Amino acid sequence: MTIDSTPAPLSAEPVRPIDTGELNLDLHLGMRVIGDKRKALGTLDTLVRDPGTGRLTALAVRHGLYNQRLTVVPADRLDHVEQGIGVLRITKAAFMQLPRVPPDC
């Protein structure tokens, strides 16, 4: 089995910036997530919201061989969603330095 991590070409359609305070975002679990220079980062696993306000505070992105890693990304790194792909303002190197959820959680 081969995994194609090459991001699909994105259209020139205008995109709507994400307001992390919105309750109804264009995000869905399992969507592809990419970073700067269209580098594939993984798939969206969890949306973390403030229980008091409902405001999006973080995203958990599943990645790695067999998707065994789960990395927490601050919501302010989310730039927009384009054609069903979450686009983050982060380099792959910076993404790899973010906190990971321990495997036993």
Image: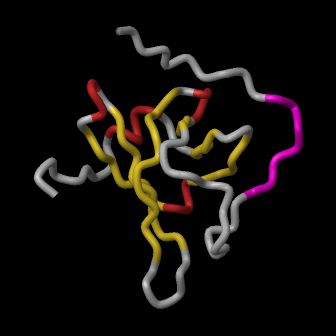
Reply above or below: 62 against 9: below
The image shows residue 46, relative to residue 4, as above or below, that is below
Give the left or right position of residue 5, taking residue 93 as reference: right
Determine the image quadrant of residue 22.
bottom right
| Secondary structure, magenta segment, majority class | loop
Figure disc tally: 0
Residue most toward the front? Answer: 1
Residue 59 in the magenta stretch? The answer is no
Q: State whether residue 52 is above or below residue 94.
A: below
Please tell me whether residue 52 is drawn above or below residue 37 in the rendered image: below
Location of residue 10 in the rendering, given as x and y in whole percent from the top left corner: 75, 28
Quarter of the image that includes the N terminus: top left
* The furthest residue to the bottom: 52
Q: Position of residue 47 (x, y in %)?
A: 46, 62
- Front-lying residue, 38 or 91: 38
Q: Which residues are magenta?
A: 11-17
| Of residues 94 and 72, the one drawn nearer to the viewer in this rendering | 72
Colour convention? secondary structure
- Could you tell me which residue is drawn at 62 percent across and 42 percent down? 87
Q: Quadrant of the C terminus?
A: bottom left
Residue 45 picture location, percent across and down: 41, 50
Residue 79 percent location from the top left of the image: 65, 51
Q: Is residue 52 left or right of residue 71?
A: right
The reply, left or right, for residue 100 in relation to residue 35 is left
